[in-house]
């Protein structure tokens, strides 16, 4: 059973200007017209009025909640879930939003996600009726969760790379200028504990990249990790240990040990904020990769925002490296950059189970020690990199997804040998388990 619409609300902490008053009045009027249309079961007209209220600047959790209910009635479950997620950021609306998010997940056939939402609703709800409804839905889904559970994800892509590159620890070392077709496979299995071990988790992932002709650039990348998360005051904190092993061209080349921590607020206006830190130790399995040996520090800040139908994500990354570097006597190559990166991602659900998204990143890299060359050149290497990705996804039969992607990378450096552009084209299918 889906709960009723919320009553009109407009949060105002300061005396509005005349212009703000007109905007406020317009938003309230559209909101009330949306409620009236909904009560007449004219859900499409209700949606239009609620969206007009959003356009007028109304940002109340009540409005997002009502949009979620309306989209649910229209069968637009993806959009309904997005608005319930926004409404759930307000502690007053969290119990109702969590419960209805469970209904959305259940309609989408994702029983595990539905169970998690109903459990969250049961945990935070103070209303006995809502507690009983959440408990009833959990019973229908098979009662309490087992002591542990598994889920996973698999993806297969075919693609074209117009500048096949040698890479290590996620970074391009040098582009070859050669093009080739490729196939890639990624699979991941996740384990989560519940009961007394709730908060403990682990996962294993394997990525395989196979080129049609350039076998020396084939990649196999194994990831193993264990993590633990727990509430801390009004935050949720997670720590993770991760091991990564990399093969290139059939030869083991590198291993990476990482300790990571991240945290986000569970209530209040900063709820969409995520903060993280990673410390990695990188060591070679092949002497050719020895210059990359050393330490890597990363600090991440990320913020999520919903603007009408758009889901936006902004990020900042700081990276500090202390690597072995490559000293050839007359030539010296620094492998220890200090990096600053800004990222933005926008995703838009489309009719018919389609979604499009775009991601743009700018990264500046300043290497810590001056490079020198045999011709007498000596300068600190500085790189500027732009990276753009465009995705189109279609859920053609749940839970199968078809994905089409384009990625372009453009790196410019004050050392010409590190300039490169790269275009990647993908098409493939993915399925969660």
Image (tube, helix red, strand yellow):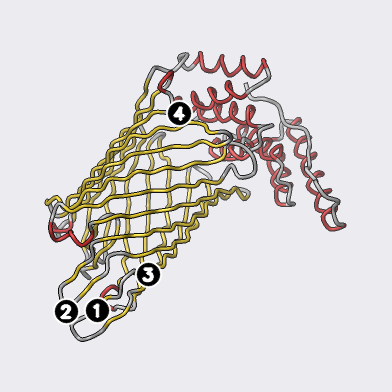
Residue at mark 2: 330
Classify 10 Å Cα crowding around label 4: few (below 14), some (14-19), many (20 and above): some
Residues tagged 1 and 4 counted as in contact (Cβ below 8 A): no
Q: Which quarter shows the C terminus?
A: top left
- Residues at circles 3 and 4 in contact by the CB criterion of under 8 Å: no
- What residue did someone put label 3 on? 366
Q: Which residue is mark 1?
A: 372
Q: Which one is closest to the eye, mark 3 or mark 4?
A: 3
The Cα–Cα distance between marks 3 and 4, rounded to whole angstroms, is 45 Å
**Marks 2 and 4: in contact by CB < 8 Å?**
no
Choose between 147 and 333: the one closer to the eye: 333
Q: CA distance from mark 1 to mark 4?
A: 57 Å
Mark 4 vs mark 2, foreground winner is 2
Q: Is residue 148 left or right of residue 134?
A: left
Q: Quadrant of residue 193?
A: top left
**Secondary structure category for the residue under label 4:** loop
Identify which residue, 308 or 293, lies in the foreground. 293
First in sequence, mark 3 or 2: give its number.
Answer: 2
Mark 1 or mark 4: which comes first in sequence?
A: 4
Rendered view: 136 above or below 301: above
Work out which quarter of the rendered image holds the N terminus and state it.
Answer: top right
Marks 4 and 2 sit apart, C-alpha to C-alpha, by 61 Å
Percent position (x, y) of residue 227?
Answer: 37, 34
The image position of residue 299, as x and y in percent, is 44, 53
Looking at the image, residue 324 lies above or below residue 150: below
Q: Are marks 2 and 1 in contact (CB under 8 Å)?
A: yes
Tell me residue 288's x, y (percent): 14, 61
**Mark 1 or mark 2, which is nearer the start of the sequence?**
2
């Amino acid at each position: 059973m889906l709960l009723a619409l919320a009553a009109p609300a407009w949060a105002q902490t300061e005396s509005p200007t005349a212009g703000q008053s007109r905007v406020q009045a317009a938003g309230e009027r559209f909101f009330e017209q949306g409620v009236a249309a909904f009560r007449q079961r004219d859900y499409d007209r209700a949606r239009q009025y609620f969206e007009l209220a959003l356009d007028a600047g109304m940002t109340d959790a009540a409005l997002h909640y009502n949009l979620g209910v309306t989209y649910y009635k229209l069968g637009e479950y993806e959009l309904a879930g997005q608005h319930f997620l926004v409404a759930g950021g307000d502690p007053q609306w969290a119990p109702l939003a969590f419960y209805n998010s469970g209904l959305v997940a259940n309609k989408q056939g994702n029983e595990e996600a539905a169970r998690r939402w109903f459990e969250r609703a049961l945990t935070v709800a103070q209303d006995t009726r809502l507690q009983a409804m959440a408990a009833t839905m959990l019973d229908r889904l098979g009662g309490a969760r087992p002591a542990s559970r598994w889920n996973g994800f698999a993806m297969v892509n075919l693609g074209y790379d117009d500048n096949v590159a040698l890479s290590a620890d996620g970074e391009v070392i040098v582009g070859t200028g050669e093009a080739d077709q490729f196939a890639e496979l990624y699979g991941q299995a996740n384990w989560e504990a519940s009961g007394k071990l709730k908060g403990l988790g682990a996962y294993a992932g394997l990525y395989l990249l196979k080129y049609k002709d350039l076998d020396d650039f084939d990649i196999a990348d194994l990831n193993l990790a264990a993590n633990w998360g727990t509430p801390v005051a009004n935050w949720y904190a997670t720590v993770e240990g991760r091991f990564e092993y990399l093969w290139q061209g059939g030869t083991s080349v590198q291993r990476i040990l990482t300790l990571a921590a991240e945290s986000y607020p569970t209530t209040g206006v900063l709820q969409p904020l995520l903060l993280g830190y990673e410390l990695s130790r990188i060591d070679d399995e092949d002497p050719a990769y020895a210059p990359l040996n050393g330490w890597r520090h990363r600090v991440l800040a990320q913020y999520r925002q919903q603007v009408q139908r758009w889901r936006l994500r902004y990020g900042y990354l700081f990276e500090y490296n202390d690597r072995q570097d490559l000293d050839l006597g007359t030539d010296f190559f620094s492998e220890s950059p200090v990096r600053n990166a800004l990222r933005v991602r926008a995703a838009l659900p489309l009719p018919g189970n389609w979604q499009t998204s775009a991601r743009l990143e700018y990264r500046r890299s300043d290497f810590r020690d001056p490079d020198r060359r045999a011709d007498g050149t000596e300068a600190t290497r500085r790189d500027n990199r732009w990276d753009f990705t465009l995705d189109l996804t279609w859920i053609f039969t749940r839970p199968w997804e078809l994905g089409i992607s384009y990625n372009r990378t453009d790196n410019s450096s004050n050392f010409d040998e590190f300039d490169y552009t790269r275009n990647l084209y993908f098409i493939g299918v993915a399925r969660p388990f």
